[in-house]
Image (cartoon, rainbow, N blue to C red):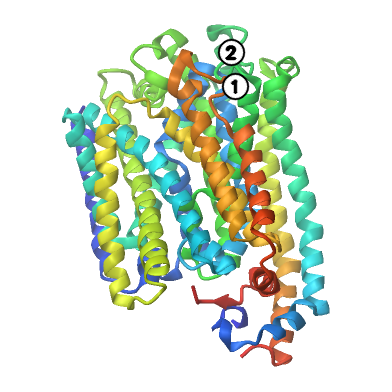
Amino acid sequence: MNLFTIGMFATILLVSFGITAWAASRTRTTTDFYAAGKGLTAAQNGFALAGDWCSAAAFLGFTGLTALYGMDGALYAVGPLVAFCTVLLLIAEPLRNTGTYTIGDVIMYRMRQPPALAAAIVGTIVINLAYLIPQMAGGGILIKLLFGFRYDVSVVLVGLGMIIYVAIGGMLATSWVQIVKAVLLLGAGLIILILSLKGVGFDPLVLFASAEAKAGPSFLLPGNLLKNPFDEVSLGLGYMLGLAGLPHVMTRFYTVPDAKTARRSVIWVMFLAGAFFACTTIFGLAAVHYLGPAALRVDNPGGNLTLPLLAQYLGGGKGTAGGDLMLGFVSAVAVATILAVVAGLTLATSGAVANDLYVNLVKKGNVAEHRQVAVARITAVAVGIVATLLGILAEGVNVAVLVILAICIAASANFPVLALSLFWRRFNTGGVIGGMGLGLISSVGLALIGPAYLGPKALWPLVNPTVIALPLGILGAVLGSVIWGRDHENERRFGEVTFRIQTGLRSDHV
Amino acid sequence: MANTVKLMRSDVAAGAWTENVQSVEFKTLIDTKRRSIVPMIVIYVIGYMGLSVLAGFGRGILGIKVLGAVNLGFVLIAGNYVMSWALAVVYARISGKSHDPLVEIVVEKAYARGRLP
């Protein structure tokens, strides 16, 4: 805890509240609130996507995993980039061409039947909460560590920050908070990269050799973290398809004016976030090289403090001005990261509750525009309070399982339903319910009886159940469609759906 | 921009869509997209899932030293970064040069046919 951290953190808060005030004056319609008026440029949305996707779990977590477990950490880091290939080639443009504010919009656009929308709402809310709770808990722990507040007070502070961003500034504020945070994060990454490589004469091969010499011959092999081979496959499958099912990332494509801009924003995020993820592998190896594997295992649960420790060392070491400066900088960026990511999640959850559940499912779309914005703001406050309470309750609970769960459900339940809605003529409401239901139940069930939650008493061996849950989700979607029977009206409309998906002719109904 | 025009579903009779969807230019668009996107999907699914499967079941293979301490696993990981970035650039180029102009033709013809408001 030092003055520089406080100063840096206060500056970030001031800037972000300034952005919120500016965004508030420009947020009047539902399109403003959920989609920043659909006016972001490709570069802006690309940076905001990078902000969303580089969570604290990514930048602290991947570095720590590489430092503690070698190649498995690098495998964790490369997946999120490859995941964007799926988004770029299959999902981003069709999604931009069909939906308005949420993933639920896409499902409703295709199916036009309330049970399908209800299933999509359940999927979105479960995934977002599973993602939100660990972030809230992580933010609480970090603020507690930095400022010495009690854990529950720290979580409330995180909750308060995100509620202010989202309820007052909507998507415009959330996007710019993400952009600022992404710039800070990439800046911090670049500084640490240069300092890490400077010590070895800018030859990364030295880092590999040194890490192997210090941490043992098996360090650079896979399997140090994910012992079960099927867990490596689950990790790959979960990433490759899960990103395209994460509501808070996908709703970012509604903030741009058209599919071409959506595509270009994916290219931006692939280079920004991809380069950053690649750096986390270097950081992990550098931490082993400079600090030694033994020092990294002291008071460093899950390796999450590896990057702050490395930054402190590179700045000059503990107790030096440079070391404090770097530690403060990285810590402040970490808090900014968590705040920005929870804001994005809160907004996406509010969209599912206010737009999908209240406006489209309960009121069948008959809600006046200004009333929709009011409902969205109130929902954002409510979602924020629920997330804060759950974050407080999560103290001491093993929340790691939730992170795995979120990506597993996204890959096994949301992705099949979304992809089949866009591309399969015979897919129908029964398929949405079957896919969402079986994908969700198998993900949650298998994660809860696995080692991530039960530890050594686990009833089945895999930490990440995607390798089983995904085929089950697809099976549920296909069987559900068949059992539901032919929906001829839906199939007749599929031509129009395809035409709009491919050309971007808009239909602002829903 | 023609393709960002907003319209209500009810403005266009259901039958009109059949004609638009079955038009030669729309079929050309779909075929062109499919021909470029499907091979790219095959490349990254094989490239990335291959790496994941080897990480699980081919640990000895990934451990083969290639360059100093760097083993085949890290080379393939680096390869996945390069592959993803290359696909991004190639897709941006192909979609800008061949998909987008085709979309414009499809939309123009649909309007000319009088099937869109």
Which of the 4 quarters of the picture holds residue A224? Answer: top right
- Which quarter of the rendered picture does the N terminus of chain A lie within? top left
Q: Position of residue A92 (x, y in %)?
A: 59, 58
A95 on left or right of B76: left
Q: Is residue B112 above or below residue B49?
A: below
Viewer-proximal residue among A163 and A460: A460
Q: Residue at x 68, y 40 (%)?
A: B82
Disc 1 crowd, CA 10 A, few/some/many (<14, 14-19, 20+): many
Viewer-proximal residue among A227 and A308: A227
Q: Residue at x 70, y 81 (%)?
A: B17
Q: Amino acid at mark 2?
A: Phe
Q: Helix, strand or loop at disc 2?
A: loop
Viewer-proximal residue among A138 and A306: A138
The answer, for residue A271, to whether it is visible in the render is no
Q: Position of residue A159 (x, y in %)?
A: 25, 45
Disc 2 crowd, CA 10 A, few/some/many (<14, 14-19, 20+): many
Q: Which mark is residue B30?
A: none
Q: Name the residue beneath numbered marker 2.
A: A219
Q: Name the residue beneath numbered marker 1.
A: A71
Q: Residue at x 36, y 35 (%)?
A: A134
Q: Is residue B103 above or below residue A88?
A: below
Give the chain of mark 2: A
Q: Position of residue A16 (x, y in %)?
A: 27, 53
Q: Helix, strand or loop at disc 1?
A: helix
Viewer-proximal residue among B36 and A347: A347
Q: Same chain for the residues at labels 2 and 1, yes or no?
A: yes
Q: Alpha-carbon distance for marks 2 and 1?
A: 7 Å
Q: Amino acid at mark 1?
A: Met
Circles 2 and 1: CB distance less than 8 Å? yes
Q: How many marks?
A: 2
The answer, for residue B38, to whether it is visible in the render is yes
